[in-house]
Amino acid sequence: MEQQTLLLWGFALLGASLLLVVLEAFVPSGGIIGMTAAVAAIAGIVVFWRVSPGWGITGMLLMLVLAPISLNFALRLMPHTPMGKRLILSEDSESQRRRSTLEQAQSAQEQALLGAVGSALTSMRPIGTIEIDGTRIEALAEGGVIEAGTRVRVTSVEGSQVKVRAVA
């Protein structure tokens, strides 16, 4: 009768440890629940060894197989939980829409600069400041030094880098 009770305790402790691993994905505990799961798993294996070496080996093999499976399940489930969404810092659809609109506006603004004519405010060796329609822009001179006051034309815009050439 004592062996049956110990076996029940062993299975209960191993089952509790697996459930605690999954619970860790839902409850922010800073690893306390995970540590409790590890202690419960070790206690369950110790109880199995008290029954017999055969049960001890069986308990260890069960944990070697079921622990990674439950951990994998918890990690796959975690991004869909409220805590997981906060940890992963995923954007909601409104933020994605706003960011996309901002990127499109920035791209359109960059393309509008293409071919624009302005003047160099500083000597460009090769980087300096230009002014186009009252807006100051840091630019890169293509093809050598451009002196301050020289008229320049925007030849390309790649991200935040504006390339210019002197206008003849």
Image (cartoon, helix red, strand yellow):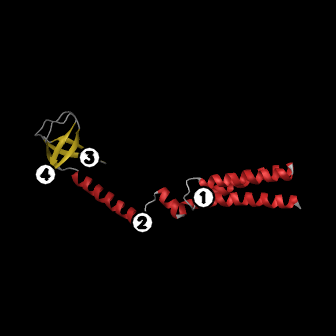
Which amino acid type is shown beneath numbered disc 1? Answer: Glu
**SS type, badge 2:** helix
Other-residue count near label 4 (Cα within 10 Å), few / some / many at <14 / 14–19 / ≥20: few
Task: Assess whether mark 4 and mark 3 are in contact (beta carbons under 8 angstroms).
Answer: no
Q: Which mark is residue 134?
A: 4
Q: Which mark is residue 24?
A: 1
At x 54%, y 60%, the residue is: 79
Q: Nearer the viewer, mark 1 or mark 4?
A: 1
The CA span between labels 2 and 3 is: 33 Å
Which amino acid type is shown beneath numbered disc 3? Answer: Ser
The CA span between labels 1 and 4 is: 57 Å
The CA span between labels 2 and 1 is: 27 Å
N-terminal-most mark, 3 or 4: 4
The residue that mark 3 highlights is 156
Q: Which mark is residue 93?
A: 2
Which amino acid type is shown beneath numbered disc 2? Answer: Ser
Q: Nearer the viewer, mark 1 or mark 3?
A: 1
